[in-house]
Image: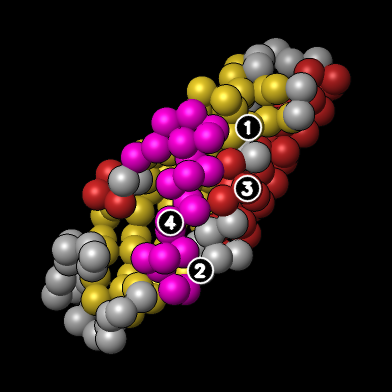
Amino acid sequence: MLPKKMTTEERLLWLADIEEIKQLKARYALACDDNYDPDGIADLFTEDAVWDGGFMGRAETKEGIREFFRNASNVVAFAVHGVSNPLIDVTGDRATGRWYLHQPMVVHGQEACFWLCAQYEDLYARTEQGWRFERVLVKARAFSPYKEGFGKVLLADLPT
């Protein structure tokens, strides 16, 4: 939401911050869709960040996130991260963001494909390298076999 009583310069900075955060999320989705590039993903996080995927796992620190995503491509053979509907609030050098995720995916060793529908709740920090994730929280709303659809199976077990 637009803060009230901003100068033109403050408003331009606020808009630029929001756009940079949108670009950060787009780079995250691109790195995930690039076979879960662990270095590309980790570089988008602060040193003490947390990635919390709920039933998909959790990683703490930039290096822990890098290590977690090194294994992701051994589980997920294909994924497309469609993120939309950003709600971003910026306060100084901190920000929050909420997004929707619509993700078709294929798991190694499975005949079935899956739909993941989730909400992201992100925390961001302005760093010397620009905006970075402090926390990414993935709240799954549906993880369903493609063939069944999430109308019949809302949350399937994650294949191992």
Residue that protrudes farthest toward the right in the picture:
9
Q: Residues within 10 Å of mark 3 (few under 14, many from 20)?
A: some
Residue under label 1, please give it: 132
- Rendered residue at 77%/33% (across/down): 16
- Rendered residue at 19%/73% (across/down): 151
Residue 35 is situated, as x and y percent measured from the top left of the image, at: 55, 65
Instruction: Quarter of the image for the C terminus: give it.
Output: bottom left
- Say which label, 1 or 4, has the lower sequence index: 4
Residue 148 is situated, as x and y percent measured from the top left of the image, at: 20, 81
Image: 113 above or below 56: below
Q: Which residues are magenta?
A: 58-78
In 3D space, how far apart are the residues under numbered discs 2 and 3 (Cα atoms)?
Answer: 18 Å
Secondary structure beneath disc 1?
strand
**Disc 4 residue type?**
Asn
Secondary structure beneath disc 4?
helix
Residue 84 is situated, as x and y percent measured from the top left of the image, at: 52, 55
Residue under label 3, please give it: 39
In 3D space, how far apart are the residues under numbered discs 1 and 3 (Cα atoms)?
Answer: 14 Å
Residue under label 2, please give it: 80
**Disc 3 residue type?**
Asp
* Mark 1 in CB contact with mark 4 (< 8 angstroms): no
* Mark 1 in CB contact with mark 2 (< 8 angstroms): no
